[in-house]
Image (tube, helix red, strand yellow):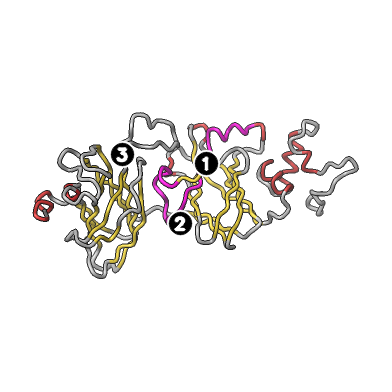
């Protein structure tokens, strides 16, 4: 009937339409699944959404593999081709709507996007919300795309799934790439090296510093800098966002420490903070990164992750350099 053009919104003499069959105890599950598949929907949630919202004509089905490690999962940039678009997002792993409790063990996140070319390393800084069993509704704009990332909490939910997006406006879903080059450097704000932010003029140059060297042939390079402080004992719940005691951030300077190239709008009390920066390498090939806590004397370990689209080198600045500057 559906293939022949039957109207899913037509009502019978009792005032019921066909969408009332899905979820009804009067209709066999196999019949309901056959009806859902016949309409091109992947599960009952998409079927009911499209049956209830005939204006939703733009639909994306994206096959994904759910994996245990968060960064191994697919990430996508979600874009609106209109000025604004209201998007319904769902993650499907079974036609059987008696298994909605699966969404307690798997799901997706919507993350504010500073960059929609490369993957983001953590959900802990710009998380907007978590997907739920019901269709998640979010409004995006042409100027402000978002990142959608899938995840699982337990190994038995890993495997094939489908990410479903529905909208009345044209939308697009673009896979995010892994960065070409990545380096991680462990460090510590300790007694004598925890200088705080630049508002503490006599202290901040005590912070650990790292030199990024861009290849001679590059005139510019996009880098992704991710600063991660040591995990606190209370931060144990998987995929949660836990406020931290210390506020952290980082700066980028030229080699003289006189020209500031990047500064955060504010320090954040998060385990992880990150920013994408385009380094202008026409004037210089070396840049100094200065990770810092907000106040001097705040001590903890950290890891500085730096990713780039082209090859680069990173080395810690020796103490003699800092003393010479002082």
Q: Nearer the viewer, residue 273 or 35?
A: 273
Residue 197's disc is none
10 Å crowding of disc 1: few (<14), some (14-19), many (20+): some
What's the residue at 39%, 37% (across, down)?
Answer: 243
Secondary structure state at the residue bearing disc 1: strand
The residue wearing badge 2 is 116
Give the image location of residue 87, x and y in percent: 60, 52
Front disc: 3 or 1: 3
What segment carries the magenta color?
Answer: 99-126
Q: Nearer the viewer, residue 248 or 92?
A: 248
Secondary structure state at the residue bearing disc 2: loop
Q: Earlier in the sequence, mark 2 or mark 3?
A: 2
Mark 3 to mark 1 CA distance (whole Å): 25 Å
The residue wearing badge 3 is 246
Q: Are marks 2 and 1 in contact (CB under 8 Å)?
A: no
The residue wearing badge 1 is 130
Give the image location of residue 127, x and y in percent: 46, 45
Give the image location of residue 26, x and y in percent: 80, 32
């Amino acid at each position: 009937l559906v293939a022949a053009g039957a109207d899913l919104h037509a009502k019978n003499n009792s005032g019921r339409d066909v969408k009332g069959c899905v979820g009804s105890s009067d209709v066999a599950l196999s019949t309901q699944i056959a009806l859902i598949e016949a309409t091109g929907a992947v599960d009952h949630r998409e079927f009911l959404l499209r049956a209830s919202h005939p204006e939703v004509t733009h639909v994306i089905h994206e096959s994904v593999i759910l994996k245990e490690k968060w960064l191994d999962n697919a990430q996508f940039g979600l874009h609106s081709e209109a000025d604004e678009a209201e998007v319904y997002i769902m993650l499907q792993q079974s036609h059987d709507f008696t298994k909605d409790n699966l969404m307690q063990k798997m799901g997706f996140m919507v993350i504010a996007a500073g960059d929609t070319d490369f993957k983001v390393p953590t959900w802990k800084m710009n998380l907007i919300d978590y997907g739920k069993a019901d269709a998640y509704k979010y409004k995006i704009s042409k100027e402000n795309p978002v990142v959608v990332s899938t995840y699982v909490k337990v190994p038995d939910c890993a495997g094939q799934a489908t990410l479903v997006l529905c909208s009345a406006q044209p939308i697009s879903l673009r896979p995010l790439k892994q960065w070409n080059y990545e380096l991680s450097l462990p460090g510590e704000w300790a007694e004598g090296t925890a200088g705080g932010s630049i508002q503490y003029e006599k202290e901040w140059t005590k912070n650990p510093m790292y030199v990024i060297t861009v290849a001679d042939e590059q005139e510019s390079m996009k880098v992704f800098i991710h600063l991660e402080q040591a995990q606190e004992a209370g931060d144990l719940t998987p995929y949660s966002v836990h406020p931290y005691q210390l506020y952290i951030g980082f700066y980028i300077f030229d080699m003289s420490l006189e020209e500031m190239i990047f500064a955060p709008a504010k320090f954040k009390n998060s385990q992880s903070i990150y920013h994408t920066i385009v380094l202008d390498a026409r004037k210089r090939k070396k840049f100094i990164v200065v990770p810092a806590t907000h106040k001097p004397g705040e001590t903890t370990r950290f890891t500085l992750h730096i990713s780039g689209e082209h090859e680069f080198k990173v080395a810690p600045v020796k103490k003699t350099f800092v003393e010479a500057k002082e």
